[in-house]
Amino acid sequence: MFFIALFTVWAVVSSCMTGLVDAASSNSPLGFSIKYTTIAGYFLQDESSTNASTFSFLDTNFGLINRTYPTDAKYDPKGKKTQWQRFANQVFRLNREAPPGTQYKLLYMGRHGEGYHNAAESYYGTPAWNCYYSLIDGNGTVTWADARITPKGVAQALNVNAFWASQIRNQKIPVPRSYYTSPLTRCLETANLTFGGLKFPGRHPFVPIVKEFFREGISGHTCDRRGTRSYIQGAFPNYQIEAGFSETDQLWQVYHAETQLDQDIRSKTVLDDVFTNDRETYLSITSHSGEIASLLRGEKA
């Protein structure tokens, strides 16, 4: 599942579903704060009429609404450009004409493919999963601690890879210029299968950055306990791991779960980090359904 979000970001120095987001900043003890806004009118995922339970980005051009833009008359007077090309030009103009301290970014936020923890919950049922099975590493046949993706999950990711290839070829979709991923194995695997082998600009290869705070909401479930830094580096040697990433998981605790407020604070912290340090407009984040929802709530923070 992909969520695309166009964000505006305002960042005033003082001392991601699909959507367009903007952000602004004001005084804070850290020297600045960032305000995020999702810009409606560009993606179906932002429309109240869209049924999230039946919506498919694969059937709707990633959800990009078929519409005209104020920039079309000069950019595409003969009507030869694709919807994505015209949208990219609109985003370019939004950034060029934005007031100081404001920027627009497009976030491609992809959820991981089906993991063995998802399959186990479906098999045992949610009550039994929450009360017992989620608290152990596996059942002797299958391991779901820091779950890998199932064959179904692999197929889902490869299907998205083929969709990206067709969008690049036929729609001239602007590809991500930076890639980020949760440190949990199901996301590390999904990112690789989703973007591996695709044709990207030489200056912007698929080299994702592993960031601790893009992980799923932290609970006592063993599927939410990440592997060691050494494991991630060895299993995914082409990935970059952010500075300060601890060898062992310092956030997961048995029988402990972070609150939604705690997760939202964590999500805004990592968004602030990315928006402050990454100048690119098109960003990919491979994460989790709960974390993506938290990131989108960040515009209300």
Image (cartoon, rainbow, N blue to C red):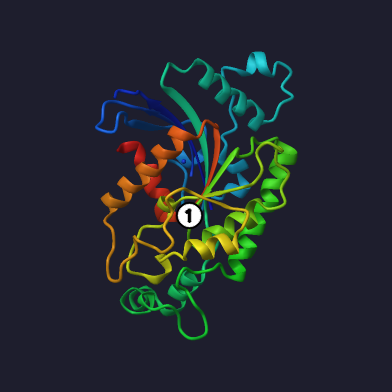
156 left or right of 129 in image: right
Q: Nearer the viewer, residue 41 or 246?
A: 246
Q: Nearer the viewer, residue 28 or 58?
A: 28
Residue 222 percent coordinates (x, y): 39, 71
133 left or right of 59 in image: left
Q: Is residue 136 visible?
A: yes
Amino acid beneath label 1: Ser
> Where 188 sits versus 135, above or below?
above
Residue located 52% across and 30% down the image: 279
> Where 158 sits versus 75, above or below?
below
Q: Nearer the viewer, residue 86 or 186?
A: 186
Residue located 43% across and 33% down the image: 276
58 left or right of 50 in image: right
Few, some or many residues within 10 Å of mark 1 (<14, 14–19, 20+) = many
Q: How many numbered discs sit on the rendered protein?
A: 1
Q: Nearer the viewer, residue 274 or 174?
A: 274
> Where 260 sits versus 202, above or below?
below
The quadrant in which residue 284 appears is: top right
Looking at the image, which residue sits at the far left?
29
Q: Which residue is mark 1?
A: 182
Where disc 1 sits, the SS reads: loop
